[in-house]
Amino acid sequence: WVGGKEVSGDCEGIYLKRFPALFGDFFEILKVGVFKMIGFVVGSSFASRHVAGARCDLRSRRQAQAEAAVDTEKATQLENLQKLTVVVEDTGDFDTIRKHRPVDATTNPSLIYAAASMEQYRALVATAINYAQKSADTKESQLVVARDKLSTLFGAEITKIVPGYVSTEVDARLSFDTEASVEKAYELLRMYEEVGVGKDRILIKLASTWEGLKACEILEKDGVSCNMTLIFSLAQAAVAAEVGATLVSPFVGRILDWNKKEYGVESYAPEEDPGVISVKNIFNYYKCHDYK
């Protein structure tokens, strides 16, 4: 950031950012030099007083930086991460979310299943089953309704813990059916509304197939925020941005796993991790094309 505006280099992602402490020292040093010149030329005591003040301020700034560095060393990795970015918890366990205090949270069927197996969540499971038995006739349809209801019950509880979004996933079996994905998204939102949670707190999670991306386009135009998941390539991320997705979820770990298996590599250095490189390329593409 320069002069209050974000500037960028080329599309390889070379960006200038404003580091207050670093530039603060530079400008203080520059100020000292200017005042010394003034004092030398006009012999003013005014300049001398400001030079002394600038030196004191510079020492105070450096002392504050040193103290901040000590605090950073004492902080946990999570606490340091929270200073730099928005943390999103991927779980259905309320206690874990309370412990880590993320801004957003996301769930998926496997996470909900794991949480639903815990004793403390039996009441939510019973509520979902009772709801399904009253809402559907056949066993198959009751199972579908119970699953969706349980997802929204967990999601509703999570909205009471996190201040931001909660992602709820559309059935993966609908990933190649745009119309069914859109219909399912509205069903989930209706269930959320039944328990007092508005769509402004929910991200509908869709697979980044072509059909899923078209469903996202339809939903976003109607004011429904979407989280496009299962992103393994820049092409998917680019289309997600073009259709107006609120959030994308690159599968960093799965990209790494595939490369390790495909090329027989046991491990990668962080800067060579294919998943990390993929996310970096997506980030630079978004910055270059001004996607927010």
Image (spheres, helix red, strand yellow):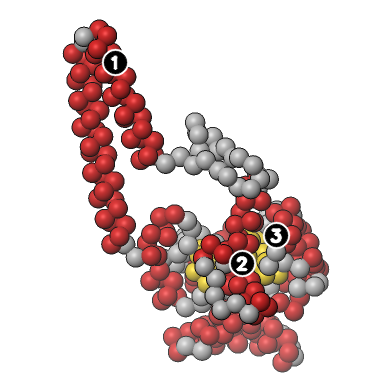
* Residue 234 point in image, percent of width and height: 70, 59
Q: Is residue 253 visible?
A: yes
Which numbered mark, 3 or 1, is in the foreground of this view? 1
Q: Residue at x 67, y 66 (%)?
A: 231
* Label at residue 216: none
Whether residues under marks 1 and 2 lie with C-beta atoms below 8 angstroms apart, the answer is: no
Q: CA distance from mark 2 to mark 3?
A: 12 Å
Q: Is residue 130 above or below residue 1?
A: below
Question: Between residues 148 and 178, which one lies in front from this camera angle?
Answer: 178
- Dot 2: what SS? helix
Q: Amino acid at mark 2?
A: Pro
Q: Amino acid at mark 1?
A: Met
Question: Between residues 148 and 261, which one lies in front from this camera angle?
Answer: 261
* Residue 12 point in image, percent of width and height: 64, 48
The residue wearing badge 1 is 37
Q: CA distance from mark 3 to mark 1?
A: 54 Å
- Dot 1: what SS? helix
Location of residue 76 by image quarter: bottom left
Lower position in the chain sequence, tag 2 or tag 3: 3
The residue wearing badge 3 is 234
The answer to whether 41 appears left or right of 17 in the picture is left
* Label at residue 274: 2
Question: Between residues 104 and 145, which one lies in front from this camera angle?
Answer: 104
Q: Is residue 182 above or below residue 93?
A: above
